[in-house]
Each structure stands twice: as C-alpha cells, then as structure tokens.
Amino acid sequence: MADISPRGVVIYFVVRMLIFHSSVTWKHWVGLLVTSAAYAVSYIQLAQMAKPAYGDDGELLDGGYDMSTGGVCSYLHDVIYITSFVQVMSILSGKFWYTYLVIPAFAAYKLSGIAKGFLSSHDSEGAPEDEKTRKNREKMEKKASRPKFVKSRSK
C-alpha cells in the first residue's frame, strides 16, 4: 500500500499535466493539490498511529497501532484508495471527481448514527414510562424469562 500514492501522483502528473498539457486548467492543479493533501494527511496519520513508543531505558512500551484492524485506520486506508481511484480516473473524465463525495457522505452517515444513539439514550432515561409501555415491557420480560422448548416433528 505504501507505493499507491506516489504511483497515482506520477500517473496523473505525467498523463494529465505533460501529455494532455493543452487542456490543463487551474482546476487540474487544484485537483492535484487536493489529492496530494489527502495522501499526505492520511499517510502522516497512519505513520503516527504505527509509531512504537519506547521508555527512557529503551524498553518497548507500545508497539504501535495494528494496521490490520478496523476503525480510523481502515477509514484512512479507504481515503487513500478512493484518492488513488479519483486521481487516475479523473484523467479520463472530470466527472470522476464526484466520487470524492463518498468520503463526506460516509462520515455524515456514521456521525448521524452516533448522534441518534446519543440523543435517544438521553431521551429515554428521564422520560416517565406510561402504563401501556410498562405493561408491554413487563409482558416481554416475562415471555423472555420462560423456558424455551423446541418442538420436534414425529414421523
């Protein structure tokens, strides 16, 4: 994975800026800067996460973040892959820049889920339970506490 961004930048620069130089506008230079910044931010963050921590005596305290796990590390890898795709494919058509909208759309989706969970947990804690909801909850608890029997077919 470490060589994806240099290849994408080199391919984009050689093909778009040198071969198709007559059709290059300021937007292409901005695109090159945006994608290069996305690479830089992602790689710097990944490097900081993977950096081991040593004590004063040289003893290894923390081996760094495991890059094969999910979470932020996975999202940063996705940003690198999407950036590579957008950068190379935008040579063919400027419409591929719209693919970059996947990144903020996914972030908004994740943040809305977190916000919903946060807001719903606070709303349900302080609200008094009405009679119908209480009876329904008690009924479900009673049903869940009963032993479960498996019916078998007899031949």
Image: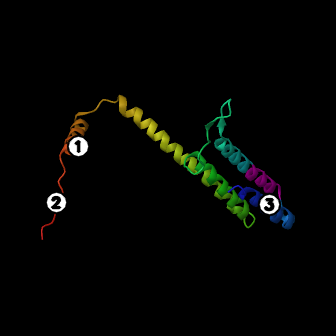
Q: Residue at x 65, y 36 (%)?
A: 53
Q: Which residue corresponds to mark 3?
A: 10
Q: In the structure shown, which secondary structural element does the residue marked by tag 2 occupy?
A: loop
Q: Would you say residue 43 is visible in this rendering?
A: yes
The residue tagged 2 is 151
Rendered view: 48 above or below 94: above
The rendered magenta stretch, by its main secondary structure, is classed as helix
**In the rendered structure, which segment of residues is drawn in magenta?**
25-36
- Based on the picture, tell me whether residue 26 belongs to the magenta stretch: yes
Which residue corresponds to the image point at 23% horizontal and 43% vertical from the top-left? Answer: 140
The image shows residue 12, relative to residue 57, as above or below, that is below
Percent x, y of residue 70? 54, 49
Q: CA distance from mark 2 to mark 1?
A: 21 Å
Give the residue at mark 1: 140
SS for tag 3? helix
Left or right: 4 as drawn, with respect to 72? right
Q: Amino acid at mark 3?
A: Val
Along the viewing direction, whichever of 98 and 38 lies nearer the viewer? 38
Task: Find the distance from the CA under tag 1 to the CA under tag 3.
Answer: 62 Å
Note whether residue 104 is visible.
no
Q: Which is nearer the N-term, disc 1 or disc 3?
A: 3
Q: Nearer the viewer, mark 1 or mark 3?
A: 3
Please name the amino acid that badge 2 sits on. Lys
The label shown at residue 64 is none
